[in-house]
Structure formats: structure tokens, C-alpha cells
Image (cartoon, rainbow, N blue to C red):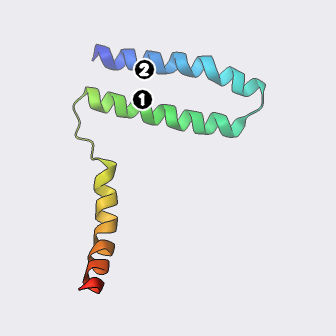
């Protein structure tokens, strides 16, 4: 649990280091994208720390493209 708190502290330090610069330059889109990616990365790191099974993105790609592959293979037979 201590490592999860450490990850949250590091994420907060990163946010406090970059967000004021973005605000100063009035980059609101950058702040939104930066915040989403930082939250996603923090959540994934904590999930990995807690040994939650995270599916591979390759599984989704395989699921989507396997019917297409099967169709193309059936055309060549």
C-alpha cells in the first residue's frame, strides 16, 4: 500500500510541475490531454502494483481482425 501512495505522490509532483506552465501559456487542450494521460498512467501503475490482471491491447486487435483474416483466407481457397 505504501508503494501506491508513493505513485500518487510522484504523479502529483509531475502534475504540479507541468500544469502551471500550461496554464501560463493558456494551453487548455494540453492540460486536458496531459491530465487524462497522467491519470490513466497512474491508474495502470497502481493496478500493476496490486497485481490486477490487465488484458493486453493485442487481444482486442486480434479479436477485431481475426474475422477479417478468416474472410480473406476463405477467398484464397
Residue 49 percent location from the top left of the image: 27, 26
Q: Is residue 45 left or right of residue 33?
A: left
What is the residue that sits farthest to the front in this orientation? 76
Q: In this view, does 15 lie to the left or right of 63?
A: right
Whether 60 is drawn above or below 75: the answer is: above
Circle 2 Cα neighbour tier, 10 Å, few/some/many (<14 / 14–19 / ≥20): some
Residue bearing the label numbered 1: 42
Residues at marks 1 and 2 touching, judged by CB atoms closer than 8 Å: yes
Quadrant position of residue 70: bottom left
Label count reads 2
Quadrant position of residue 32: top right
State the residue at coordinates (28%, 84%). 76
C-alpha distance separating marks 1 and 2: 7 Å
Q: Which of the labelled discs sits on residue 8, or is there none?
A: 2
Residue 44 percent location from the top left of the image: 36, 34
Quadrant where the C terminus is found in the figure: bottom left
Whether 15 is drawn above or below 33: the answer is: above
Quadrant where the N terminus is found in the figure: top left
Amino acid at each position: 500500500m505504501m508503494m501506491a501512495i508513493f505513485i500518487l505522490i510522484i504523479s502529483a509532483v509531475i502534475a504540479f510541475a507541468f500544469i502551471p506552465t500550461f496554464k501560463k501559456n493558456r494551453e487548455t487542450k494540453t492540460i486536458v490531454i496531459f491530465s487524462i494521460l497522467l491519470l490513466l498512467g497512474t491508474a495502470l501503475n497502481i493496478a500493476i502494483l496490486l497485481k490486477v490482471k490487465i488484458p493486453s491491447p493485442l487481444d482486442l486487435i486480434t479479436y477485431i481482425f481475426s474475422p477479417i483474416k478468416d474472410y480473406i483466407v476463405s477467398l484464397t481457397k
